[in-house]
């Protein structure tokens, strides 16, 4: 003898409702207001990937974050750092400069682009960015180290330029 499961009317109603919801979503009949898609936080995902050392994947996340927020200079700054770490200095310079177009006061971008320009041999532009960095130095426990490094580099640029003009 087969025993059949007896469903209460409320249980049956819930199952029918679940099935209808599934079919409505499947065939696009559900009201758009009832859908609540989750937006991923691509910027934080990129930062996490970068901490793990996966800079290529981080760049992908940063690109997606920038697509969603094209006026966020922090995303461009993080992209520039990742490009630097993947050995793409020209892309890094380009992204630092784009970040500075959006936010001239982004001192981290001035600092980063200055040293890439210096490696490229563009000492004049590097010095300009170091001065911009030093005009608004960052605050915090590590800031003094970066400020000293920028000041020393600016002195080196000045002394090299002075010895070349003699």
Image (cartoon, rainbow, N blue to C red):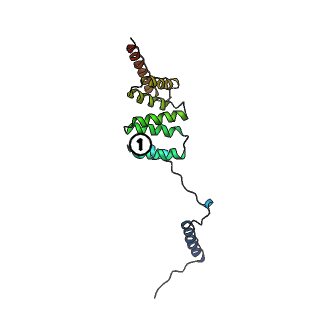
Quadrant (top left/top right/bottom left/bottom right) for the N terminus: bottom left
| Residue tagged 1 | 50
Position of residue 69 relative to residue 94, above or below, is below
Q: Secondary structure at mark 1?
A: helix
Q: Residue furthest front?
A: 165
Locate residue 69, reporting x and y percent. Answer: 54, 44
Where is 17 relative to 4, above or below? above
Q: Quadrant of residue 47?
A: top left
Q: Is 32 left or right of 128, judged from the image as shown?
A: right
**Residue that appears at 54% across and 54% down:** 38
Residue 111 seen in render: yes
- Say above or below: 81 vs 151: below
Percent across and percent down for residue 119 are: 38, 28
Q: Residue furthest top?
A: 166
Q: Is residue 5 above or below residue 152?
A: below
Give percent across and percent down for residue 106: 52, 32
Residue 48 in sight here: no
For the C terminus, the image quarter is top left
Q: Residue at x 40, y 35 (%)?
A: 89
Q: Nearer the viewer, residue 50 or 99?
A: 99
Name the residue located 51 percent from the left edge and 35 percent from the top edge. 99
Most extreme residue toward the bottom, as rendered?
1
């Amino acid at each position: 003898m087969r025993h059949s499961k007896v469903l209460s009317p409320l249980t049956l109603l819930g199952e029918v409702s679940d099935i209808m919801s599934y079919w409505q979503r499947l065939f696009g009949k559900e009201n758009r207001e009832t859908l609540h898609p989750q937006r991923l936080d691509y910027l934080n995902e990129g930062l996490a990937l970068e901490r793990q050392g996966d800079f290529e994947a981080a760049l992908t996340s940063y690109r997606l974050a920038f697509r969603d927020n094209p006026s966020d200079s922090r995303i461009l700054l993080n992209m520039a750092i990742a490009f630097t770490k993947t050995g793409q200095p020209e892309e890094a310079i380009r992204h630092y400069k784009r970040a500075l177009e959006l936010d001239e006061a982004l001192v981290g971008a001035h600092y980063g682009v200055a040293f890439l320009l210096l490696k490229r041999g563009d000492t004049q532009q590097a010095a300009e960015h170091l001065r911009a960095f030093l005009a608004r130095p960052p605050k915090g426990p590590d800031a003094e180290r970066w400020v000293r490094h920028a000041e020393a580099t600016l002195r080196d640029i000045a002394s090299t330029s002075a010895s070349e003009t003699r």
